[in-house]
Image (cartoon, rainbow, N blue to C red):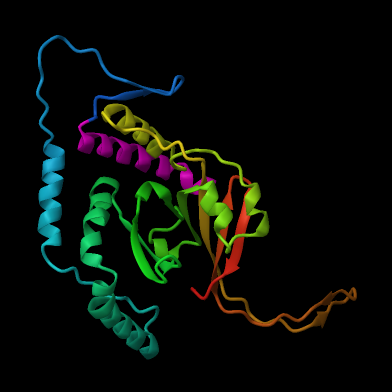
Amino acid sequence: FKAASTGQRFKAESEWYTNELYREGLHWTKIDRKSGTVQTPKTDKRVRRQINLVRQELRGIKNFITSQQAHWIVAPSDDGQEAQQEAAINNQLLQGFLYDKLDISSKLYDVHDNGFLKYYGCWMMEWNDEIDDLDLYTLDSFDVFPDQSVREPRDGQFLVKTSKVTISKIKANQRYLPDRADVIADNRESASEFKESLGLVKSESSSDGHLDETSSAIVYDVFLKRPAIDAVEESIDAEGVITPARPAEDAAIYIITFAGEKLLRCEKTNLK
């Protein structure tokens, strides 16, 4: 996670931060890192009228794109006939059924917003216990940390999703380990320093804006890809050391969840 948060990621986030400020018309603001306050530049007594052309252009482009139904092509996992057939079925499922069921048309606007300002947008689809059904929602690109060592996210060995969760929800989550009650609140807005600063700027500039005072912690969901493991037969080397037999295991994705230094979950999924 530290590797994914530094280097190229830091450079990208600094650009996203600047883009967000321009979209909000707050590009002239600065943050005093020592005091943690927003600094506004001194101006003369002339009245200046600001016209936000960035927001206007973004809205026009997104309206044009979302005016037509989106189309996807599900890529097969390999060149085999079975994979090709599975991809064709999944494409029909996504285009014909899930598009309406998950109300994708109404969720394109936000993901395009992230795409223009932060160069990529993310959706998360998972089972929602509260509605007892599949749910699809947009993730802020600031809160998603893909493997920076690969070109395509699907080729990465891990992906980290972060979110601000109230302590009460953490304690009530039955999927987490019993000692979840020991999680300590950090009351941060995000794992990203830039998003943290952005929230401070927006709250200071808004007449009715305020930071959430609810006790919370940043929860990290790490999706860790484990490659397939070949079977090993029991063997004995020349020194009499026994290597126990081990069955073959398919590739799998594990979800490791933690908050602060507290492990909340380590679960093997059916994803590959």
Residue 262 sits above or below residue 80 on the image: above
Residue closest to the eye, 40 or 9: 40
Judging depth in this view, the residue of 21 and 248 nearest the camera is 21
Who's the residue at 45% across and 50% down the image? Answer: 163
Direction from residue 232 to residue 74 in the image, left or right: left
Horizontal and vertical percent position of residue 39: 32, 19
- Residue 110 horizontal/vertical position (percent): 25, 54
Q: How many marks?
A: 0
Q: Residue at x 25, y 60 (%)?
A: 107
Measured from the top left, where is residue 37 in percent x and y? Answer: 39, 22
Which quarter of the figure has residue 41? top left
Q: Which residue shows up at 25% across the image and 45% down it?
A: 117
Left or right of residue 95, residue 136 in this image: right
> Relative to 191, is 72 on the left or the right?
left
In this picture, which residue range is highlighted in magenta? Answer: 1-25
Question: Is the stretch drawn in magenta largely helix, strand or loop?
Answer: helix
Residue 54 left/right relative to 159: left
- Which residue is found at the position 64% from the left and 50% from the top? 181
Q: Is residue 39 above or below residue 217?
A: above
The stretch drawn in magenta includes residue 122: no
